[in-house]
Amino acid sequence: MPIDILMPALSPTMEEGTLSKWLKKEGDPIKSGDVIAEIETDKATMEVEAVDEGTLAKVLVPEGTENVKVNTPIAILAAEGEDVSKAAAGGAAAPAPAAAPAPAAEPAPVAAPAPAAPAVAAAPVAVTVASDPAIPAGTEFVAMTVREALRDAMAEEMRRDPDVFVIGEEVAEYQGAYKITQGLLQEFSADRVIDTPITEHGFAGLAVGAALAGLKPIVEFMTFNFAMQAMDQIINSAAKTHYMSGGQLGASIVFRGPNGAAARVGAQHSQDYAAWYSQIPGLKVIMPYSAADAKGLLKAAIRDPNPIVFLENEILYGHSFEVPKLDDFVLPIGKARIHKTGKDVTIVSFGIGMTYVVKAVEELAKDGIDAEVIDLRTLRPLDIDTVIESVKKTGRCVTVEEGWPQGSIGSEIAAQLMEKAFDYLDAPVLKVTGKDVPMPYAGNLEKLALPNVGEVIAAVKAVTYR
Amino acid sequence: MAVAKSQVGSKAASTEGRKVAASRAAKSPATSKSSASKSAGGAKAAIADFTKEQELAAYREMLLIRRFEEKAGQMYGMGLIHGFCHLYIGQEAVVVGMQMAIRTGEDQVITGYRDHGHMLAAGMDANGVMAELTGRRDGYSRGKGGSMHMFSIEKQFFGGHGIVGAQVSLGTGLAFANRYRKNDLVSLTYFGDGAANQGQVYESFNMAELWKLPVVYIIENNRYAMGTSVVRSSAQTDFSKRGASFNIPGEQVDGMDVRAVKAAGERAVAWCRAGKGPYILEMQTYRYRGHSMSDPAKYRSKDEVQKMRTEHDPIEQVRARLIDKKWASEDDLKAIDAQVRDIVNHSADFAQNSPEPDAAELWTDIVR
């Protein structure tokens, strides 16, 4: 029976890619292990190896095709002894399990119900944030991924200030494990884009020392899971020195990298540290959702004289958003963004949590519930005033985040609303969070462990008594 | 980076002495050490003699640290100093000798929590240090740091760190900044035999040699990590060899002899300034007091302490040479003693009379 060769997923979060090159042509014999094609994702170019043997009967997806979804049949392989032309005409009845381990029933086994990347997120109602710099009329907006926004932010700040440098694992020659530092080595040289050994505790401490001496390091953690190795330096050395020195000395440093669950990488690589870092006086903590916020806030973070924890998300890296095309787009740290105005309920979220909210809000609108959505953007200092003002109007609040429930950002907001806006509340504040379990590996369990759109909708209906 | 312009009180003379020493160090060729070697161990190796001025400066500096620490211990007992207080008594030759080998106010210094001696040797004001110990507003950190957390940008002293070993990565970062700025400054990164077993020390060694960072790692081996002796805690007790697997040269130094310290410090600093990377100095020293004020030090015998005090005391060694060479009379030394006691007593008065920090200080200096 002919075998379908499927578009493979070459990384945990890959949803689609470009089939850049066929290295075999129709009629070529294929042996298992042969490199048959090259695939380009937003992160890298990778080779596709054949699993099965036979003859390449038909190429279904020509080279140069973009946005080929994972698990799409890209070619048909005639098994040994099969009629090649017949195989090419008929195709395979079902994907051969040997060629593609991913089950066909379930679309791409990605944990978060993330929109297919790079999809331009549904344009929110344009709400201006009073504290954000006014964007001049006629400013051009360009679609940009979060990944590109982060890279541009670093590159712009490195051009502006020679004391800014990037240090971390695979940031230079490899161009970034998640390709966030792509091109920086070429522009700024190895003096300023520095590959480290795998030694988080040591290089975080080294960078803090360099910051104490007046430089402005950007420390990339390949993921924040590995920053636990460096936690002491981030908190005891970076966050506390300014206070302990009576204001004499401080560290202007950014610790950045992907945070939280990616997809199917298990408990040790899927933790959201938002609440942990947000507890530390002396740190500022930023967790952007959109590309514009990622760019404007990373630029602000690099200029800020304080230690900053900048929490990114691997799944969001490939998402596109409209970003104003300005020479120097810097956003204020510590100000929430009203993503959408509404009158019935306040939904507070940040980072990837926003992806659930954006979808839920569309569904809620169909039921006549007009939600106001606040994207916190910064978790410390927490812009509770914006939340309170909204709750004064709506009387109801739901928080959404991927982190664990106990001591979560939502817990903090609930407590502060009780203290400061109790008389305005018409319902208890509800939290939608990740479940109180280490992240499981199995696809179905991982889905259950994370929040979902249904939970957001249910929480909103509960507080609006629908 | 500006050279410190003002010197505190009567410290000017000794600082001059340091400058002379530093300029000499710059001229002396770097002694190439391709691997760890034992060069000291008993001050038997040929050590360049100090000039009269150097001996007097070293004597005075070491005495200041000793008297200051004795006073701090006394004030702790009186309930004027609280919390952790780690005294440096016995180890004075290490910081004083090393400081003579560097450019004060330009080269960086960083250490752990047994830090009062390092601060005084770096030329920080005794009043400000003592007032920090009493938690008052005129302390270096305005009373918010305490014994383990003081800093001086003017003297390029970067603390004062309470987590064992953390300063090793930080000090490596200070050296990184020097290399980044392409200057010829050196980071003196001090830590103890206890910290030498922390993982981040080796992460730092690796990067320092890989990137040829100008850092002198000074391991103050005072034989006890809190109450655990080096033989009970360390598989390799020759700390000068701890950089061997990273190709970092190291030396064991008689840390009770200020001349040996200075000479080794000059070799190490010259190595770093020449762009050859890091250098390790194991200072074999001894602390007379417990780990902290609350430590009765029952893990060692009184005889052991007494033997070190009578046979190896760093201050007595200098004192004996000064008398022996007739560079100073008993009266001359008494005069220095009186001068030092004045500074220390004044700092104690100052630290008790300085007001507590304003309550509003609770909320300042968190972010800037």
Image (cartoon, coloured by chain):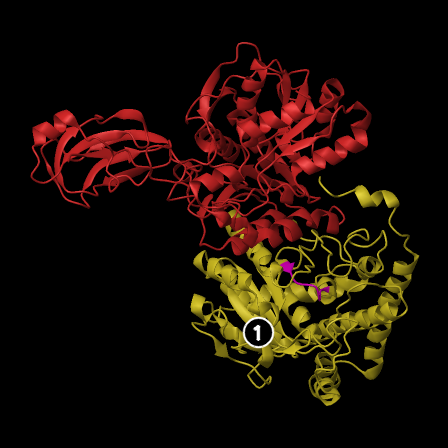
Chain colours: A red, B yellow
Tell me which corner region of the image, top left, top right, bottom left or bottom right, holds residue B312. Answer: bottom right
Amino acid under disc 1? Glu
Compared with residue B252, is residue B121 higher up or lower down, i.e. above or below? above
Q: Residue at point 82% right, 55% down?
A: B139
Q: Is residue A74 visible?
A: yes
Q: Main secondary structure of the magenta part?
A: loop
Numbered disc total: 1
Question: Is A406 in front, or is B11?
Answer: A406
In the rendered image, which residue does mark 1 sit on?
A: B282
Q: Residues within 10 Å of mark 1 (few under 14, many from 20)?
A: many
Left or right: residue B8 compared with residue A223: right
Which quadrant: the N terminus of chain A? top left
Q: Residue at point 41% right, 26% down?
A: A116
Report in which chain the residue with disc 1 lies: B
Q: Position of residue B287 (x, y in %)?
A: 71, 77
Left or right: residue A266 compared with residue B86: left
Q: Which residues are magenta?
A: B109-115
